Image (cartoon, rainbow, N blue to C red):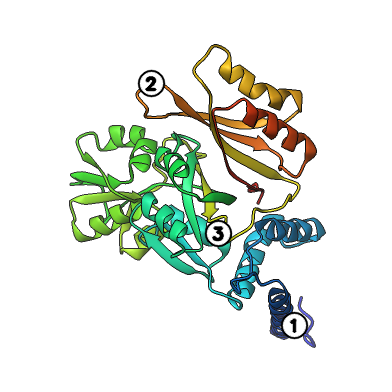
Amino acid sequence: MADASHPPHADLQRLKTQIDEADRDLLALLNRRARLVKEVGEAHKNAEGQVAFRPEQDAQVIDRLKADNTGPLMPDSVAPIWREIISACRALETPTRVAYLGPAGTFSEEAALGFFGSTVVKVPCASFDEVFHLTATGAADFGVVPVENSTEGVVTRSLDLFLTTPLFIIGETSLFVQHNLLRREPSIDGVETVCAHPQALAQCHGWLSAHLPHAERRPVASNAEGARLAGADSKLAAIASTRAGSEFGLNVVAPAIQDEANNRTRFAVVTHPQRHPQPRASGHDCTSLVVSVTNRPGAVHDMLMPLKVHGVSMTRFESRPARSGQWEYYFYIDLQGHPDQPHVATALRELREACAFFKLLGTYPIDVH
C-alpha cells in the first residue's frame, strides 16, 4: 500500500523535476562543448579558412565514450547521439555540404545523415555520376555512395567512377536495408508495375516472382524516385524505405520483402584530396586501392605476395573489366590497416612495384558502430 504521506504522483513529479534539471545541465554542457570546439576550429583552420574534417578523430571520440559508458544507456546508442552532437558543433564553424543519390527518402540520404549527423546541407543528386561530379568540383564537400551490398555484391558504377575522378575515400558506413513494397492503395491488388533502383529489384527478386509474377519491373534512378512515381499513379508500387513512404504519402502494403533477412549496404564517403587530408590511423582502419597487372602467367599471384609476406590481411578483392578490348581487368582491393603502419607501408610499396597501374582510393576508419 502506498504511503499516504508520499503519494505516487508526488514521487513522479519529483522525478520529472530531476529530469528537467538534468536536461538544463546537459544543455549547458553541450554549449560549453560547442564553445570549446569553436576555439579549436579557429586554431586549426586551413589556408582556405576551413576546418578540416577528421573522421578518425570522431571515431576515436566515440570509441572512447563507448568504452567509458557504464549504462544504463546502451553502447549502441552512444554513436548516433554523439554524431549528432559533433555535427551540430561542426556546423557552428562552416556548413558541411553532402551529396548523395536523391531525392528525399533514399537509403543514401539515410547513410549520409547517419555518418555526418543531421546538421548538414543536403545535396540530393539524380545519379552516382552527379554525386562524384559535384564533389570533385567543390559544389559539395563530401559525397556518399553505395559500394557494396551483402546480397548483390559490388555497385559497379561507383567502382568505375573511382577510376575517372580524383576523389578518394575518407570514411565508410553500413546500413541495414529493409525493402518495403509501397503504394497509394492499401493492398497489392491491381499492381501493374513495380518501380525501384535495379539493385533493389534484384534484392527482392524472389518475393516479386512469388507475389507479383506478372507485374512489370521498372528500373529507376533511385528507390525514392520510384516512391515519388508511385505516389502519382495508383497502378504503380515502389520498393523503398519507410522514410520514403512517409515522404510521399504511401502505404506499406508488404514490409521487409528483401530476399535476404540480413541485407546490408556499405557506403563510401568521398572527398577531394586537395580540400581534406587523408585520415590518420585510428586503430581500426581500411585501405582501399585499385590496381592492374600485365597479362602474364602468375602476375596476380606475384602482385599479392607482398601482402602475405608482410602479414597484411586482404578483406575484399573484386575485378572489373578495363574496357580495353584486350581482356584486361582492374582489381579493387581492401586491406586491413593504415599506411602509417610500417608493415602496411612496406607491403603497399612492394605491391605498387608489381603493378602496371596502382591508385590508392583512400585509407579510413572502418564502420564499427
Of mark 3 and mark 2, the one earlier in the sequence is: 3
- Identified at 39% across, 62% down, the residue is 124
Q: How many numbered circles are shown?
A: 3
* Labels 3, 2: front one: 2
| Label placed on residue 114 | 3
Quadrant the N terminus occupies: bottom right
Q: Position of residue 298 (x, y in %)?
A: 58, 13
Label 3: few (<14), some or many (≥20) within 10 Å? some
Of mark 3 and mark 1, the one earlier in the sequence is: 1
Residue identified by numbered label 1? 25
Q: Vertically, is 154 above or below 24?
A: above
Query: Closest to the observer: 229 or 305?
Result: 305
Q: Vertically, is 318 above or below 72?
A: above
Of mark 2 and mark 1, the one earlier in the sequence is: 1
| Label placed on residue 329 | none
Residue identified by numbered label 2? 326
Report helix, strand or loop for mark 1.
helix
Badge 2 amino acid: Gln
Q: Position of residue 219 (x, y in %)?
A: 27, 43
* Residue 175 appears in the rendering: no
Label 1: few (<14), some or many (≥20) within 10 Å? few
**Tag 3 and tag 2, C-beta contact below 8 Å:** no
- Identified at 66% across, 60% down, the residue is 54
Q: Vertically, is 48 above or below 175?
A: below
